[in-house]
């Protein structure tokens, strides 16, 4: 369990020498506890204290990085059982299984490439490919790997129990850093040797937690730590039980042989039930989920669930500050300003679309707060709105100077006009539902 700031403070020399860059030892201890400072910054701390703090600071679940350098993915390093305790850090990786015997590898790879959608300002997609060595033929497996990497630089998981297949392809994948799946009870020594040689993460797979622990301890004794684990659950209850026990054991009991990311290879063929199992795996701690097929409806379910689970419960969902086009606005179109709370953005944008009036939608960064909350917090003030409009460059795109503000901040009208010389501020509606009627009247009155 990580130490608190006070516990760290008790271990420090308490000289307040400021050599660490902080005014007091207590301030430094708090930053170390928050992960914003390193104990090495304290020149007065003894080696024994540094070793103790480093041990306490080591994540209970190891972080693993894989994939091409410019598209690498990090998994693991989770710190809590429940999202409301803090947050989940590294979203579950969704991978599509492709077999080296498939005749339509190109088509399946294209499905992965085309899976990308945008939702609430985030790009969501299938993240990786799991290539299964179904042929057990090293040459054919290598041919399939080459076909994939020549078409797309994408994170890969090599699904082979054949050490010859693994050895043959890994030499060509030094810049890709794939995950090797997997080490079984039969091939563990050879696979560990290959994983160490090529410095790639290795997945340990066996039926049940006890067998996995035994194999992981053996690998640890060989000096290798880049490990993922798969307990081969066959049913929903096995998946739920295994993943929950693994997360609890690693976080609460600090059992190091289970402190690794979980890979879940779904073996269910029915698309609906596979989606149910994948959803359960996202909810309950799988770092990677391998799917047998991907379709638009399945992707939407899993993407949305993953995005919600891995959003920070203490931070509202936000939209990037910008001037957005709704329809095809021109220099005469109205401009409406509001905050970057995602729900506000989508409600206002939707009602502008309903009005059929092309408009400029000025979304201002207010830390994701709604209009009234942002105003009360001083983040949606007259001076900040004026500064945003001036710096946005929208003045060069308009031949008018009329800014529509939300009805809830009508009190800012005069102050904004003072801060924005030459502009007229128009008070809009309080509720987004009134925007269509308001905009139609607004345009009619200007003509």
Image (tube, grey):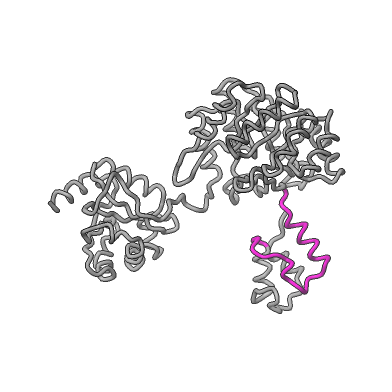
Along the horizontal axis of the image, is 37 left or right of 440?
A: right
Query: Is 119 located above or below residue 43 in the figure?
Result: above
Residue 347 lies, in percent from the top left, at 34, 45
Q: Is residue 326 above or below residue 137?
A: below
Does residue 121 show up? yes
Question: For the point 28% across and 54% down, which residue is it?
Answer: 336
Q: Is residue 47 magenta?
A: yes
Give the number of callouts: 0
Q: Which residues are magenta?
A: 33-60
Identify the residue at horizontal 36%, vertical 66% (top origin). Answer: 384
Query: Is residue 240 visible to us here?
Result: no
User: Which residue is more in the foreground, 38 or 421?
Assistant: 421
Residue 346 image point, x, y percent: 37, 45
Q: Position of residue 167 (x, y in %)?
A: 78, 34
In the rendered structure, the answer to whether residue 271 lies left or right of residue 319 reads: right
Residue closer to the observer: 315 or 119 = 119
Write the residue at 33% across / 55% down.
Answer: 362
x and y percentages locating residue 9 in the rendered image: 72, 69
Residue 409 in magenta stretch = no
Q: Left or right of 375: which side holds 227?
A: right
Given residues 95 and 247, the one toward you in this image is 95
Image quadrant in which you'd find residue 164: top right
Q: Nearer the viewer, residue 391 or 15?
A: 391
């Amino acid at each position: 369990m990580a130490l608190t700031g006070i516990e760290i403070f008790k271990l420090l020399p308490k000289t307040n020498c400021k050599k660490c860059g902080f005014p007091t030892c207590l301030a430094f201890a708090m930053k170390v506890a928050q992960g914003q400072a390193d104990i090495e910054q304290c020149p007065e701390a003894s080696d024994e204290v540094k070793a103790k703090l480093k041990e306490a600071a080591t994540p209970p679940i190891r972080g693993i990085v894989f994939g091409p350098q410019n598209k690498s993915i990090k998994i693991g390093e989770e710190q809590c059982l429940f999202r409301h305790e803090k947050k989940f850090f590294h979203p579950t990786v969704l991978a599509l299984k492709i077999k080296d015997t498939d005749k339509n590898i190109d088509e399946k790879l294209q499905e992965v490439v085309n899976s990308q959608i945008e939702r609430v300002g985030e790009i969501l997609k299938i993240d990786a490919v799991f290539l299964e060595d179904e042929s057990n033929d090293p040459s054919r497996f290598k041919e399939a790997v080459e076909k994939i990497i020549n078409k797309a630089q994408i994170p890969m998981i090599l699904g082979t129990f054949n050490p010859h297949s693994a050895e043959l392809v890994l030499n060509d994948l030094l810049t890709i850093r794939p995950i090797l799946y997997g080490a079984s009870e039969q091939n563990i020594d050879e696979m560990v040797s290959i994983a160490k040689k090529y410095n790639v993460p290795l997945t340990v797979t066996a039926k049940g937690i006890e067998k996995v622990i035994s194999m992981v301890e053996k690998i640890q004794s060989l000096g290798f730590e880049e490990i993922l684990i798969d307990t081969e659950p066959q049913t929903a209850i096995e998946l739920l039980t295994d993943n929950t026990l693994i997360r609890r054991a690693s976080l609460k009991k600090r059992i190091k042989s289970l402190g690794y990311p979980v890979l879940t290879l779904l073996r269910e063929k029915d698309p609906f039930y596979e989606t149910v199992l994948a959803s359960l795996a996202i909810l309950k701690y799988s770092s990677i989920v391998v799917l047998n097929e991907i379709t638009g409806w399945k992707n939407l379910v899993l993407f949305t669930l993953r995005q919600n689970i891995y959003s920070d419960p203490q931070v509202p969902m936000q939209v990037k500050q910008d001037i957005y086009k709704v329809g095809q606005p021109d220099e005469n179109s109205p401009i409406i300003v509001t905050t970057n709370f995602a729900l506000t953005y989508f409600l206002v944008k939707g009602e502008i679309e309903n009005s059929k009036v092309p408009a400029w939608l000025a979304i201002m960064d207010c830390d994701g707060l709604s209009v009234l909350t942002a105003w009360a917090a001083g983040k949606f003030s007259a001076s900040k709105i004026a500064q945003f409009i001036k710096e946005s460059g929208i003045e060069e795109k308009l031949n008018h100077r009329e800014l529509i503000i939300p009805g809830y901040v009508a009190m800012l009208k005069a102050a904004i006009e003072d801060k924005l010389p030459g502009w007229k501020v128009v008070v809009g509606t309080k509720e987004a539902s009134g925007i269509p009627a308001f905009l139609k009247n607004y345009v009619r009155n200007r003509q």
